[in-house]
Image (tube, grey):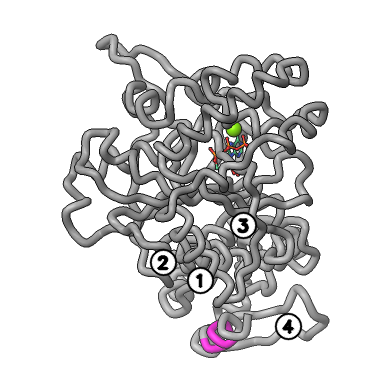
Amino acid sequence: MHDVLPEQTPLWQYAEKIIQEVLGAYGYSEIRLPVLEKTELFKRSIGEVTDIVEKEMYTFDDRNGDSLTLRPEGTAGCLRACLEHGLLHNQVHRLWYYGPMYRHERPQKGRYRQFIQLGVETYGMSGPDIDAELILIMDRLWKRLGIRDKVKLQLNSLGTIHERNIYRDCLVSYFQQHLDQLDEDSLRRLQSNPLRILDTKNPAMQAVVANAPELKDFLGTDSAEHFKAITTILDNLGISYELNSRLVRGLDYYSKTVFEWVTDELGSQGTVCAGGRYDSLIEQLGGKANHAVGFAMGIERLLALVETLDNLQLPKPVDVYLIRVGESAQQEGLRLAEMIRDQVPGLRLQVCADGGSFKSQFKKADKIGADYAVILGDDEVSRGVVGIKSLRIQQEQQTLTPSQAVTFLQDYLRSR
Ligand code: ATP
Ligand code: MG
């Protein structure tokens, strides 16, 4: 679990702002959810025989003896909240949430025990438009962050649960004929979750997986048409994708559409964003049969990609640094700083609070990365003026009245 230190937070805030703008552009509303839920919720939704439930959850009994779990993902909690508050009956059917998720995994680059996800969920819409809309949102986000050419979309359809069960039987008998080529993990999954074998990262198993029967040959007309309609929309809007019939996702609740955005710039943790349709989950959690499709994005992996850009310009914490020297400048400086904050909202103004000579305060101004120093000495106070000096370009210090200084800083803020 990581601390995000002050030098890293500008990158986070930059991405978070863009994420909010992009979701806003599609009319999605934010929902804020607790990080703890009843363990039962995750077992019922994610599935007992998934990596998450089998070995990754942080679960404990609270003082009442109730079993609680730190959320390993957000879909279940979001749906729990919507059912609890009757949200599925009114108009708010496009939601997003953002926050920490917890999984007890082996930590490595791009894989942490607390990580941040953006989750986007939509309810009540069965048509292919909404599946495509989610993909458009992600595509727009990559473009806004400048990483569009670093990620690729992979698409598949898992069909309905019924279609998948027929496929599953067929897959199990195929693998049973090739038991000698399966690793220990896959042998275990053969009964519990055979589709997950297709997801193996073991190079020795690539051949046996490549020759396995393909799910796409088992889709019924409705599933096949739904999938075709999504690809038609993407074709029309110029969004490229790869069909990947081995894409099965780790969670049990998906049906029909599944997708992942992958990159080859982050080593083995290359999936930045993943999601799909999970029409059966609402009923499974006690709601009326309904439709749902969503995705989750790992923000640490997203930021790791953004950080590979060489032209990234992130804001520094301070624009202007106020230097005060002498007895009368102390009080006057605070008054001036508050006046500037009133008049120039958005400007980040820091007052030097630990004194020192002009020289040492200038050094601090430079170190914190401010563009300008505003200078107040006894002389300026007695004349009713302030000094302003650029810390970035060679320029004489200017002497301005307070209201000229405000205009100067307003212009600076506009041009920044
Ligand atoms: P993976 O195959 O990498 O384990 P997953 O299928 O378990 O991923 P999801 O549950 O679909 O992942 O989560 C969606 C996204 O959240 C992932 O694509 C990834 O970007 C991010 N993510 C998942 N687990 C972690 C983790 N332990 N640390 C950081 N990011 C994670
Ligand atoms: Mg995982």
- Badge nearest the viewer, 3 or 1: 1
In the image: residue 46, left or right of residue 265: left
Helix, strand or loop at label 3? It is helix
- Residue highlighted by disc 2: 129
Task: Give me the disc on residue 10.
Answer: 3
Image quarter (top left, top right, bottom left or bottom right) of the N terminus? top right
Task: Give me the disc on residue 233.
Answer: 1
Query: How far across and how far down the image is residue 135, in percent?
Result: 52, 62
Real-space Cα distance between discs 3 and 4? Answer: 30 Å
Real-space Cα distance between discs 4 and 2? Answer: 59 Å
Give 371 or 172, whichever is nearer the viewer. Answer: 172
Helix, strand or loop at label 2? It is helix
Q: Amino acid at mark 2?
A: Asp
Give 198 or 345, whichever is nearer the viewer. Answer: 198
> Does 215 appear in magenta?
no
Real-space Cα distance between discs 1 and 2? Answer: 8 Å
Q: Are marks 1 and 2 in contact (CB under 8 Å)?
A: yes
Query: How far across and how far down the image is residue 82, in percent?
Result: 25, 45
In the image: residue 104, left or right of residue 344: right
Q: Residue at x 78, y 42 (%)?
A: 267
Task: Rate crowding at label 3 as few (under 14), some (14 to 19) or many (20 or more) other CA atoms within 10 Å.
Answer: some
**Magenta residues, as a range?**
407-411
- Residue highlighted by disc 4: 397
